[in-house]
Image (cartoon, rainbow, N blue to C red):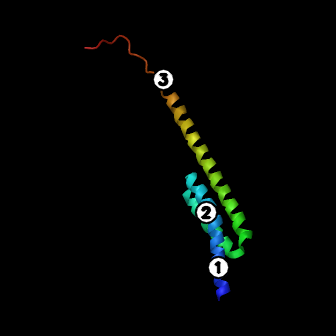
Amino acid sequence: MDFNLWVLLRGLAVGALFGALPVIVGATRNQRRLGRWGFLACVAGSLVLGLFLAIPTAIVSVWLILRADRRAAAARQSAAQNRRRYADVQTYPLPLARGRRSA
């Protein structure tokens, strides 16, 4: 019984250690949800196969966070370009009415 508890605690500790990387990267890149999911995946993977699954899970989680951050930045840039494009279209002046006098 003591050995099984030791293995479980060691798996949790290793998973938490490697799971901290996605949490930190997710927090700095405004992808906290993906960071938390990466942490949980690292802990679960560490419980199943130890380091053999915790390390690749951490790497894949960080890659997904960075990819999501790049996509969000591209979407923000595209939205800004669209706003500028529509603002340029709507800036044409109206023609002045001729022959009218104000009272």
Q: Amino acid at mark 2?
A: Ala
Q: Nearer the viewer, mark 1 or mark 3?
A: 1
Name above or below for residue 44 compared with residue 81: below
Label 3: how many Cα within 10 Å (few below 14, some 14–19, many 20+) = few
Q: Earlier in the sequence, mark 2 or mark 3?
A: 2
Q: Earlier in the sequence, mark 2 or mark 1?
A: 1
Q: Nearer the viewer, mark 2 or mark 3?
A: 2
Residue under circle 3?
A: 92
Q: Secondary structure beneath disc 1?
A: helix
Dot label at residue 21: none
Q: Secondary structure beneath disc 2?
A: helix
Residue 101, horizontal then vertical, whole percent:
30, 12
- Residue 35: in sight, yes or no? yes
Question: Which of the 4 quarters of the picture holds residue 4?
Answer: bottom right
Q: Quadrant of the N terminus?
A: bottom right
Residue under circle 1?
A: 8
Nearer to us in this view, 74 or 51: 51
| Direction right: furthest residue | 52
Label 2: how many Cα within 10 Å (few below 14, some 14–19, many 20+) = many
Residue under circle 2?
A: 20
